[in-house]
Image: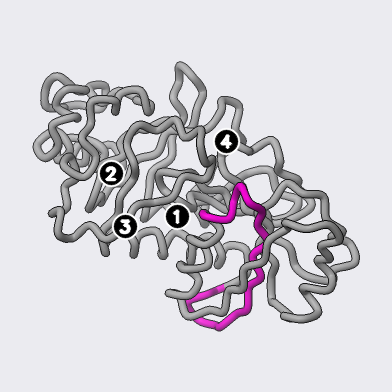
Amino acid sequence: MVHATMIKTAQRAYDSVKIYRMIYGRRPRIETDIPFISHVQFHRARSVLDCVADMSDIHGAVPSYIQGSQSLPLTPVENGEEWSYRLNRLASALEYLGLPVNHQRYKFLIVADEMTGVFASYFSDQLGWLRHQASLTYVDFPGFNLQREVQCLDPHAVLLMTSFRLDFAESGARLINLLNINQFWQQTQEYDRLLFCDELHVIGACRAGEEDYHYDHSLLFLERDPVSDRLAVTLPDFSCWPWIRFTIGPSGLPTFRPIGDD
């Protein structure tokens, strides 16, 4: 089933988007016709003009997590359907961590710094659309006290999106690390983790003490590029821009398993 869907997805991209006709050379017929690709293939793309969605439906662009050094030559844009997919991936990942955001209401505290603030705001917006309270605070001054912030807001969980060293032990809060896939080295197994990338936002979740990440197989496919050992993502129901066997992050990432596949 996965193989058939992969071929159908690649054929749709070939038929709809000029850059994929340039990448593939011919309409894919079998899985081996679909190469693993990286951001360098998109230097000839025309951003919004190469989207499947109509230009009038485009309502925003995904902010770059690494400001000033973003390597992707194509700014990821989104329409309403893509926004919904991102919300669903976030909700699925949080539910895996024991926070069923589609069934209960929570208060979140997002801790960011000047480097991660733009993407932290994106998380805050998404949690707001899911009808949860999401407060955003910045580690931008000496003497920042996480315990004091937690006492003031009393959140159900703190989403930590900073490399600053903070006093976690005394905060008394549940901590979830938000990790960009290119900063994977910052992870610690002591806390729950959400993994995201610039192009697709949240892609997986990992519980404290676990090594493997879990993802919603109904919303994306994850594979390994057998040559580079990098993670490759495919959106089977793309509505805006097709990501097909697109490699992200460094090599040597942990195992990724569909949720429920234990």
Residue neighbourhood size for the residue with mark 1, other residues' Cα within 10 Å, grouped as few (<14), some (14–19), many (≥20): many
Tell me which amino acid carries mark 1: Asp
- Mark 4–mark 1 Cα distance, whole angstroms, equals 21 Å
Of tags 3 and 2, the one toward the viewer is: 3
Residue neighbourhood size for the residue with mark 4, other residues' Cα within 10 Å, grouped as few (<14), some (14–19), many (≥20): some
- According to the picture, the residue beneath numbered tag 3 turns out to be 60
- According to the picture, the residue beneath numbered tag 1 turns out to be 216
The mark nearer the N terminus, 3 or 2, is 2
Mark 4, secondary structure of its residue: helix
Viewer-side residue, 91 vs 17 = 17
Residue name at image x 20 percent, y 35 percent: 46
* Residue 155 drawn above or below residue 170: below
Q: Which mark is residue 249?
A: none
Mark 2, secondary structure of its residue: loop
Q: Which residues are magenta?
A: 100-118
Left or right for 166, reference 20: right
- According to the picture, the residue beneath numbered tag 2 turns out to be 1
- Mark 3–mark 4 Cα distance, whole angstroms, equals 23 Å
Tell me which amino acid carries mark 4: Asn
Residue name at image x 45 percent, y 20 percent: 226
Residue name at image x 56 percent, y 83 percent: 105
- Mark 3–mark 2 Cα distance, whole angstroms, equals 33 Å
Tell me which amino acid carries mark 2: Met
Mark 3, secondary structure of its residue: strand
Percent x, y for residue 221? 38, 43
- On the rendered image, what quadrant is the N terminus found in? top left
Q: Which mark is residue 182?
A: 4
The mark nearer the N terminus, 4 or 1, is 4
- Mark 1–mark 3 Cα distance, whole angstroms, equals 24 Å
Tell me which amino acid carries mark 3: Gly
Residue name at image x 68 percent, y 43 percent: 211
